[in-house]
Image (cartoon, grey):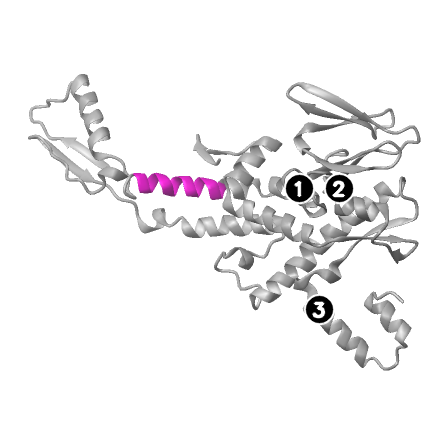
Amino acid sequence: MLLSGVGRARWTPNDYASLAREGYQKNAVAYRCIRMIAEAAASAPFAVFVEGVRDEAHPLARLIRRPNPEQSGAELMEAVYGALQVSGNAWVEAVGDEVPEELWALRSDRVKVVPGRSGWPEAWEYCVDGRSARIGRAADGWAPVMQLKLWHPLDDWYGLSPLEAAAQGVDAHNAAGAWNKALLDNAARPSGALVYGAQKGERLTDGQFEALKDQLSSAYSGTENAGRPILLEGGMDWKPLSLTPAEMDFVAGKHAAAREIALAFGVPPQLLGIPGDATYANYREANTAFWRQTIAPLVRKAAGAMTGWLEGRFPGCEVRADLEAVPALQPERDALWARLEAASFLTDEERRRMAGVEG
């Protein structure tokens, strides 16, 4: 959380636990961005193609649909995409003797890369409560662990997450919310000043001063005492203090921080209900842009990583993202069909190929 102290700001550390706690658990904007991306991307199914032909009955297709006894394919990929947004890394372990029989998502903060002599990973360590299990490569060099990561300019092994890039916006947003809460707890003003107007230079003793502070704190502060009249003894005068409208206007600051968070994740602010952004003409265009610019590249990247990883155990197979099944992209699909229908100079075979239809 952003704290002021000696003229400098203090920011949340960029470790996984701090980012997950301050960003995902405590910040509604970052939480919603991560949920939107993970759920939307997981809703785009994968299809398995063998030698260019779609095969729903292939063992790899069945494995992707039901990767383990506890999760469906969508649930597994939702965990993968969510981890990618929080930590910049997502890990999937294949379990089986000769060919993978189960796929499991591993928690990002528990996986460590064990580099070999060449500097590239030769094994992985999964650490839980001080205990670790080493996952090594197979005899033929195949890796039973797939790492999906977002590019990091300063790290060869681990990725850079959108949440880390948005950390300062998250801190500012959280700090504004905490400050507003403190204002509500104190009736939206910095209380006031109690002036002792004694004559001849008299002043309160230390005991009287502490007793008066305790009485004010217990009897007149907090939301339950808001508006309660204060009873003063002779020689006492209450001078109320107030905040200026500019000092109390944290809404604009929170919206600016929220837009910064949304920008880092690639989520149009309009989809989050943040006012002040007229970048898109309407909600439908914002949603289409979200799918085209954020979700589609992410899903294609995951499909390509799955292909490169599992092809060593399922030769000739390719995993593709079935974006044709996404309702949000249907208007663009309809427009493509209309253009192909009007293109009389194309053969039926060319139309099918351009539309992505088999046969």
Q: Which residue is mark 1?
A: 79
Q: Is residue 356 on the magenta stretch?
A: no
Under mark 3, the amino acid is Glu
- Amino acid, disc 1: Ala
Q: Nearer the viewer, residue 189 or 5?
A: 189
| 67 or 230: nearer the viewer | 67
Q: Give the residue at mark 2.
A: 67
At 26% across and 44% down in the image, what residue appears? 242
Is tag 3's residue or tag 2's residue first in the polypeptide sequence?
2
Mark 2 or 1, nearer chain start: 2
At a point 56% along the width and 65% down the height, the residue shown is 283
Q: Secondary structure at mark 3?
A: helix
Which label was assigned to residue 332? Answer: 3
What type of secondary structure mainly makes up the magenta span? Answer: helix
The question of residue 176 being in magenta is answered with yes
Q: Amino acid at mark 2?
A: Pro
Q: Nearer the viewer, residue 74 or 270?
A: 74
Q: Is residue 305 visible?
A: no
Q: Distance between the Cα atoms at labels 3 and 2? A: 32 Å
Report x, y in % for residue 86: 63, 40
Q: Is residue 72 visible?
A: yes
- Using the image, determine if residue 213 lies above or below residue 259: above
Q: Is residue 77 above or below residue 117?
A: below
Left or right of residue 55: residue 15 = left
Report the number of discs.
3
